[in-house]
Amino acid sequence: MTEFTWQYQGDSPIKVRTFIMGYGITRTLLKKIKYHGGQTLVNGQASLVNRMLAKNDVVTVVLPPEPENDHVNASQVPIKIVHEDPNFLVVDKPAGVASVPSHGYVQDTLVNRVKGYYQRKGYANQKIHIVTRLDKDTSGLVIFAKHHFAHSVLDKQLKDRTIQKAYLAIAAGRISADHFEVYLPIGRDEASFVKRQVIDSGKMSITEGWVVDRMPKQTLVRLQLHTGRTHQIRVHLSALGHPLIGDWLYNPADHLMARQALHCYHLEFYDPFNDRQISCTSSLPGDMKSFITLNRF
């Protein structure tokens, strides 16, 4: 089982519950610990969470086991691991692979592949916690939490917008500004099941961009999301008149690439279990590199 230990250094008495919630243990997780096989210990002895702690007391939280989801099939297709430790897994997703199972993609999504990897490694926790997702035809870095506690920690970072995600994209046309910011609201396109659009009733969305390279008819840009809307980059670049190369949804007349030219190349987040920043990068995939080479002159 996975466990975490902290020592209380305060001078005033404090409840165990209050102390461990300060480290990110949520009320939901407290219930799972209590009712599903976890344990809370104080100085090595089982304890209720309303017990008062004294200075130098040692609190250990033992997480309950997390059985696999029987409705998710395991795929034995290998995954490309960029970072792994006992709490987090960062995977480089290829284009053409959906992030999560759905009606259209059941057998071989990234979640299926990670489940197969967990089975091969024999991990005690077999439940798959995907934290960030990418569209099927977007390549790049995806974060998985390896247990419920790590997932709740990263969910809070997503809510607080402290997880940094940066993308490389090839946009149609030559973007003149070296640096640009887009402030446009995004909402659903009522005429489409999947499409989004810039619309006054949508949620304000912010994208920041820097030109990396200009080709005669396209631009390689680095993009930073300051909000996390569905299809945000695709919608914003389209609204600027520079849609992504190969984007069948927002640039349907373009067939220069077999998929949208978008790659999540950088991720950074805080690991509270080891008090460190985890920074991951992924190089530009071959299809985007080839496109730049072929269209440079």
Image (spheres, rainbow, N blue to C red):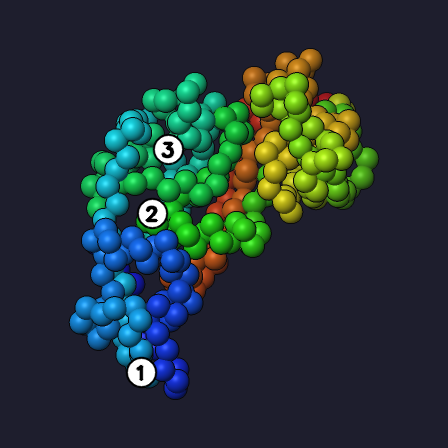
Q: Earlier in the sequence, mark 3 or mark 2?
A: 3
Query: Quarter holding the N terminus?
Result: bottom left
The answer to which image quadrant residue 49 occupies is bottom left
Q: Secondary structure at mark 2?
A: loop
Q: Is residue 46 above or below residue 200?
A: below
Q: Secondary structure at mark 3?
A: helix
CA distance separating discs 1 and 3: 43 Å
Is 156 or 96 nearer to us in this picture? 156
Three-letter code, disc 1: Ala
Query: Quarter holding the C terminus?
Result: top right
Q: Which mark is residue 111?
A: 3
Q: Is residue 156 above or below residue 185?
A: below
Is 75 or 255 nearer to us in this picture? 75
Q: Earlier in the sequence, mark 1 or mark 3?
A: 1
Residue 248: percent from the left, percent from the top? 62, 18
Residue 81 visible in the snapshot: yes
Query: Which residue is under mark 2?
Result: 146
Front: mark 1 or 3: 1
CA distance separating discs 1 and 2: 32 Å
Seen from this angle, which residue lies furthest right? 176
Three-letter code, disc 2: Lys
Residue at horizontal 75 percent and vertical 42 percent from the top: 183
Residue at horizontal 38 percent and vertical 71 percent from the top: 19
